[in-house]
Structure formats: structure tokens, C-alpha cells
Image (tube, rainbow, N blue to C red):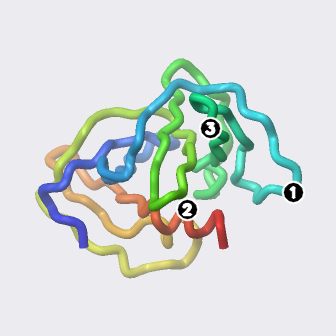
Amino acid sequence: MQSAREQYVECGLAGQRYAIRISEIQEIIRMQNITPMPDAPYYVQGLTSLRGSILPVICIRKLFGLPEKTEDKLTRIVVVQQGTAAIGMIVDQVSSVLTFEHIQKNEGSLNQKQSSLVAIGKHVDGLVGIISMEKVIAGLYA
């Protein structure tokens, strides 16, 4: 399990707090033009070009079964790296860098949202769901 002293980037989705290990994040960018991909899974928004490389972009709201939202000035693409695979993940906002007092492993896996949430981090400001980018990316290439 992740160390309680690791750093995480907090992202907002539909008013909820989620976190991604900072070591998995390549960069955070503003929204880009995204070209739709025919026959892609429902949560794949499309492709974008990032410094000459083609990057698949997913809508994490769709993946988690949350209602879609029109992008605004806070919307970001979190570019994550898992091995040789990189993807962009659209989030409502990026808030801060966190460390957790305690991390409890999530044993439930009733749906994609819960299977991507590997743990819950306890922070002084409340609980934050920790997203496993390994599981998100593995679902893309399954």
C-alpha cells in the first residue's frame, strides 16, 4: 500500500475530492482541442497532440458514472504516466498537493468507480478518494 508520507495531487470531480500519487503525474495542462475517436469506449474523450506526441484523453466523470459538465477555466487535463503508457485525464479542477495522516485500503469493487478507488486518505480537511492510475490505464488497454 502507498506510504502515508507520499504526496498526492488533489483533483475535484462533481464536488468530490480525489487524489492521484504525484509520482504518477507527468504534468497538468489546460484543456486542449480533442479529436473524437470512433468506436472508442464511452469514457474516452478522444486524442490530443502534446508536443508532437498523440495522447489519448479520458473523461474521468464518464468513467465514474458522473454527469457531464461543460469545461470552464478551472478544467484541467492531468497527464499521467504508467510504465510506457501515458493518458490525459479530464478533471474539474486541480486543488493542491496533499499528504495523508492515514490511508485505508478500499476493499469494495462494485463498479468501475470503486475499482479505480484503491484507498481513502484521511486528511485534516476530510476524506479523499485515492485513484489508482494503474487500474484506470489497465482498463483502457484491456
Mark number, residue 53: 3
CB contact under 8 Å: marks 2 and 1: no
Sequence-wise, the earlier of marks 2 and 1 is 1
Q: Residue at x 12, y 56 (%)?
A: 5
Q: Position of residue 2 (x, y in %)?
A: 23, 66
As drawn, which residue projects farthest toward the front? 52
Give the foreground label among 3 and 2: 3
Q: Is 53 situated above or below 133? A: above
Q: Is residue 52 above or below residue 139?
A: above
Does 21 sit above or below residue 52?
below
Quadrant hosting residue 132? bottom left
* Residue 125 image position (x, y, % from top left): 20, 44
Q: Which mark is residue 137?
A: 2
Secondary structure at badge 1 equals loop
| Element type at mark 2 | helix
* On-image quarter of the C terminus: bottom right
Comparing 119 with 46, the one in front is 46
Tell me the kind of residue under disc 1.
Asp
Instruction: Say whether marks 3 and 2 touch (CB < 8 Å).
Output: no
Mark 3 or mark 2: which comes first in sequence?
3
Q: Amino acid at mark 2?
A: Ile
The residues bearing labels 2 and 1 have C-alpha atoms spaced at a distance of: 18 Å
Provide residue 94's location: percent of width, then percent of height: 40, 34
Q: Which disc is residue 96 wearing? A: none
Q: Which mark is residue 39?
A: 1
The quarter of the rendered structure image containing the N terminus is bottom left
